[in-house]
Image (tube, rainbow, N blue to C red):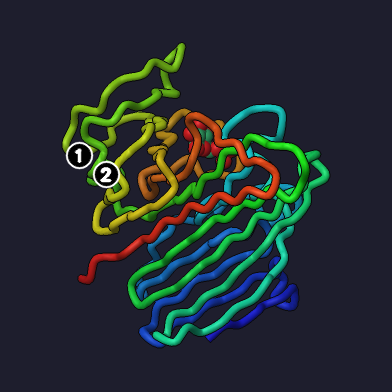
Amino acid sequence: MIEVVDKVSGKMPRVVLTHSSGASAEVYLHGAHITSWKVGEREMLFMSEKSHFAPGKPIRGGIPVIFPQFGAGELPQHGFARISEWELEGAELTDDGDVAVNLQLTESELWPHPFALRLGVLLGADSLMVRMRVKNTGSAPFPFQAVLHTYFAVEDIRETAVRGLTGVTYVDDTLAGNPREVEERQEIRFSGETDRIYVDTPNKLSVNGVTIEKSGMPDVVVWNPWIDKSKRMEDFGDDEYPRMVCVETGAIEPPLTLDPGGVWEGSTVFTASRR
Ligand code: BG6
């Protein structure tokens, strides 16, 4: 079932997807932001209780869509896609019973380049597929980065493990000079602030019981703000960091370039383990 819920509820417009298996997902037109993915009763995504839901501000938690800039730069932090109002392009039930929705963004007053950005979401019984597609609709090349900044809900960050990044080079954004190191561990565990861009990673990894399989998205960011940074974030509770970890998939390092008429596509499939 696909239901478009508008401002009547007092919130911003969003699309609610419900699968016959009991799985569900919720996508806001603001940012094309997925704020909930449930497999049965189990919420897979973390949402901050302090999140804004307001024009011009990012939502904290869920799956922010980062485009065309990751991190700080000329544009607002993490680009404009997550703070823009997207259009609902279409929604359908597929032949095999999955629930699909497409959203698009085709202009921003913050960027001079003509583009078409589409986010496709496909809800399965125990999986969620998210696809980003960028087209250069202008007459000059443009550079971009594109990331799904997924916040996973975890029971305890100290018991959380990210697997699949052994031997991968990462940029450590918590250290001065952002040194490059090689990940030696079989599983990444957390005992302090973690903010790393793993460059050119394998396409299959996992966080706790969730498998992450990506295509066209070479890089992975692993982030937890821990204690001090949590306190500095006004839209994130001081005591929320133990219940989340971001494992972000995308194209960051180096940025990509699209020629006029060119199309880039990247996707990530999250699959929950049965339990
Ligand atoms: C991560 C970055 O992707 O996003 C972190 O690596 C950053 O450095 C985090 O703090 C959250 O960013 P924001 O803009 O949503 O507070």
Residue in view at x 77 percent, y 42 percent = 139
Based on the displayed image, in which of its 4 quarters is residue 53 positioned? Answer: bottom right
The reply to whether discs 1 and 2 touch (Cβ–Cβ < 8 Å) is: yes
Q: Amino acid at mark 2?
A: Val
Q: Looking at this view, is 137 or 229 the one in front? A: 137
Q: Bin the neighbour count of mark 1 within 10 Å (Cα to Cα): few under 14, some 14-19, many 20 and up.
A: some
Q: Position of residue 6 (x, y in %)?
A: 72, 75
Residue 181 in sight? yes
Residue 48 visible in the current orientation: no
Image vertical order of residue 272 relative to residue 235, above or below: below
> Which structural element holds mark 1?
strand
Query: Are there few (<14), some (14-19), or many (20+) residues within 10 Å of tag 2?
Result: many
Q: Position of residue 195 (x, y in %)?
A: 41, 31
Q: Residue at x 26, y 38 (%)?
A: 165
Is residue 29 rendered to the left or right of residue 225? Answer: right
Query: Residue 138 vs residue 68: left or right?
Result: right
Residue labelled 1 has its Cβ within 8 Å of some atom of ligand 1: no
Distance from the alpha carbon under mark 1 to that under mark 2: 5 Å
Q: Amino acid at mark 1?
A: Glu
**Residue under the point 39% across and 23% down:** 172
| Quadrant housing the C terminus | bottom left
Please, which residue is most extreme toward the right here? 109
Q: Using the rendered view, name the quadrant where residue 185 is placed.
A: top left
Is the residue 7 above or below the residue 201 in the image? Answer: below
Q: Which mark is residue 215?
A: none
Q: Which residue is mark 1?
A: 187
Q: Residue 237, image x and y in percent?
A: 51, 44
Viewer-side residue, 226 vs 220: 220
Please give the label number shown on residue 162: 2
107 left or right, relative to 159: right
Secondary structure under tag 2 reads strand
Q: Residue furthest top?
A: 177
